[in-house]
Image (cartoon, helix red, strand yellow):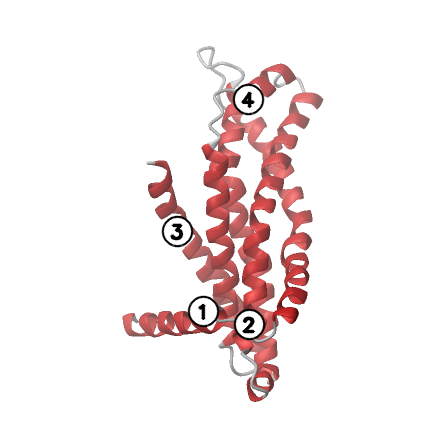
Amino acid sequence: MITAAIKQTGRYVELMGKTFSKPDNWKMFWRQLPKEMEKLGVNSIGIIVLISVFIGAIMTMQTILNTENPMLPRYSTGLVLRDTLLLEFSSSIMSLLLAGKVGSNIASEIGTMRITEQIDALDVMGINSANYLILPKIIGLVLFMPALVIFSVFCGMFGGVGIAYFTDLITMSDFLYGIQYAFIPFYLTYSLIKSLFFGFIIASISAFYGYYAFGGALDVGRASTNAVVNSSVLILLINIILTKLLLT
């Protein structure tokens, strides 16, 4: 098992070396980059917004209903929601969701190209297939991940505002005061830094499993599943490491 893990790690490093070499055609790279940003990033905004709004609303209700204590100020609900979104949900949890949506998309797309011999055709023509197919995906997702995190944070807070506006669980003034209270700007920086690492993990790991998918349709499905699982595990591991390095 350890030998297999070392072998897989070596193949991944080798693939990344080919991926981050100088593009054969810069014009084609700059043409592909915005397309990948749209496909992987822009097309994910809808699900990010929907989930973040509902999570923000649910977290606000749960915090209010489960912290009924006269010693606890009412504005603490907004503070808890803000820090939870910034520190974990909008970066880590949303990245796990994107590993399922974006990661499976990348792995299945590249895996299908592998089993239909399109990648082999690129190699025969002397094109660096790893660089041509994978680099725009990695750069596109890494560049767009901070925007998705910011979208998630604001949409989560909007969900909390909805609870304050449409219910009598908390006043709007208490909620907004909590959102602003004792704000630490580095929390946002911390969240954006994590998103860059997570974007790289999702795109590169998914591309790796798709690139080395051999066989038929079942093998592409297996590669997609492996991409999602291993991306999620690495995201959780890197999350612990970054939290230790940046917040302690």
Mark 3 vs mark 4: which is more N-terminal? 4
SS at badge 1:
helix
Mark pair 3, 4: CA separation: 29 Å
The amino acid pointed to by label 3 is Ile
Mark pair 2, 1: CA separation: 13 Å
Q: Residues within 10 Å of mark 2 (few under 14, many from 20)?
A: some
In the rendering, at what x and y percent does residue 121 appear?
Answer: 60, 86
Pick the quarter of the image with the C terminus: top left
Q: Which residue is mark 3?
A: 238
The amino acid pointed to by label 2 is Pro
Look at discs 1 and 3 and give the one toward the viewer.
1
Q: Please tell me which residue is depicted at 53% across the width and 72% down the height of the picture.
A: 131
The amino acid pointed to by label 1 is Met
Q: Which residue is mark 2?
A: 23
Q: Which residue is mark 1?
A: 16
| Relative horizontal placement of residue 66, taking residue 38 as reference (left or right) | left
Closer to the camera in the image, 50 or 126: 126
Q: Residues within 10 Å of mark 1 (few under 14, many from 20)?
A: some
> Do the residues bearing badges 1 and 4 touch, measured as CB atoms within 8 Å?
no
Mark pair 1, 4: CA separation: 42 Å
In the rendering, at what x and y percent does residue 148 appear?
Answer: 60, 46
> Do the residues bearing badges 1 and 3 touch, measured as CB atoms within 8 Å?
no
Mark 1 vs mark 3: which is more N-terminal? 1
Which quarter of the picture shows residue 1?
bottom left
Look at discs 2 and 3 and give the one toward the viewer.
2
| Relative horizontal placement of residue 1, taking residue 12 as reference (left or right) | left
> Do the residues bearing badges 2 and 1 touch, measured as CB atoms within 8 Å?
no
Look at discs 1 and 4 and give the one toward the viewer.
1
SS at badge 3:
helix
Residue 81 in sight from this viewpoint: yes
Q: Which residue is mark 4?
A: 180
Q: Please tell me which residue is depicted at 44% across the width and 11% down the height of the picture.
A: 71
